[in-house]
Image: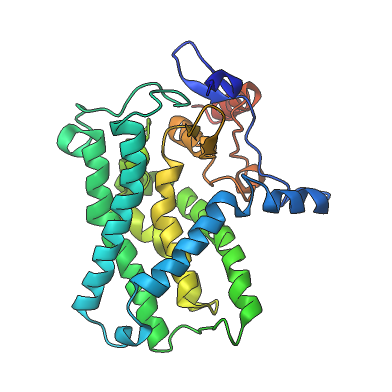
Amino acid sequence: MDEMNFGSRDARGNFSPKKPIDYGPAFAWPPKPGAVLKWFFAFPGYLLPWNLLYAIAAIGIWYFLTPQLVHFQTFSLFWFSVILVRNIVLALLVYGSWHIWLYVWRKQGTSFKYNRNWPEETAERFTFNNQTHDNIFWTLVSGVPIWTCYEVLLLWSCANGYVAMITPSENPVMFIALFFLVPFVHEVGFYFAHRFLHFPWLYRIAHHLHHRNNNPGPWSGLSMHPLEHIIYFSSALIFFIVPAHPVHIINLLSRLSLAPAQGHTGFDRVATGDSASIDTSYYAHYLHHKYFEVNYADGMVPLDKWFGSFHDGTAEAHEAMKHRRRKRGI
C-alpha cells in the first residue's frame, strides 16, 4: 500500500495525512440526519470498528472473565488479585500486540509512521533510560493497578447497593442505550481531565511524565504518573450517579485502559495488505504530543473546536496555533 495515496512527508521525513481532521456529522449544525445515519454504520464510523469492538469485549470480559457479583459484597484481596491479573493479561495482549507488530517485527517499516524515528533507547529523561521500558513500567506498575482499584470499587458498590443497577431484562432500552453513551462519557471525561492536567502546577507534578513521549508508541498510551492515572480514570465515578449494569462499568474502564494503545501507535494506519488497512484515526492525538496545547480530546465530540484548541493538521491550523502563541507571548 502506497502511503503517498493517503498523505505526504515533510523535509524531515515525517508523515501527514492528506485529509484534514474532522469530527463527523454528529454535532454538525444545521443537523444532517442522512449524514449522521451514514456515519453511524460506516466503516470507519461511529460503530465500526472501535466502539462495537469495545462493547463486545466488555460483554466478554463481564460474562467470562469476571467473578459473579456476589463475590464482591465483601472486599477480598483474592478477588482483587484475580481482577488485577486479568487486567495485566489484557494490557499485555492489547499493548503488546500493537507494539510487537509495529515496533518489534516492524511489519510495515516506517510506512504511515508520523515520526520516522523509532522510540529512544538511550535517553536520560526516561526511567531506565529507555522509552519503551519506561512506558511498560508505568503502564503495568501504576496504570493497571489503579484501573483495577476503580473497577473493584465500583463492582463492590454494585454488589452492596451503593450504585443503582439496571438489568437487560427490566431495562432493555436503557441497557442498550448506555453502550452508545459510554463513548461520549469517555470522550468528555477525557477532555476535561486532560485540560485539568495541563494546568502548569499539575503538569509539573504529574502530566509531564506522559509528555516525555513526543514520539509516542503503543505503550506510551497509559504511561502516566500515578496521580494522573487517578484523575484519568475518575470519569468512571459517573456510575455513582447514572444507573448502569456492571458491563457498562467494564466497557468504560476497558476503553480508558486499552484504547490508548490504539491512540498512541504513532502510525496513521496499519497496512494489512496491498489495498486494505486499519485506520487508527488518532492523528489528532499525535498532534497533541507534537504541539502540546492542541487536541486535548480524541476527536468525536468537537470540544477542542468549542474551546479554541483544535488543530486539524493543515497549514492554516498551524498558523492559527502560532498566532495564539504569539498573542500569549510564547
Closer to the camera in the image, 216 or 79: 79
Task: Identify the colour scheme used.
Answer: rainbow
Is residue 210 visible in the rendered image? The answer is no
Is 2 rendered above or below residue 48?
above
Can you give x and y, in whole percent of width and height, for residue 85 in the image? 24, 64
- Residue sitting at 60 percent across and 87 percent down? 170
Can you give x and y, in whole percent of width and height, for residue 330 in the image? 49, 27
Name of the residue lying farthest toward the top: 11
Can you give x and y, in whole percent of width and height, for residue 254 in the image? 42, 60
- Residue sitting at 34 percent across and 46 percent down? 95
Is 287 rendered above or below residue 165?
above
Quadrant of res 290: top left
- Residue sitting at 60 percent across and 65 percent down? 181
Closer to the camera in the image, 106 or 298: 106
- Horizontally, residue 179 falls left or right of residue 107, namely right
Is residue 1 visible in the rendered image? The answer is yes
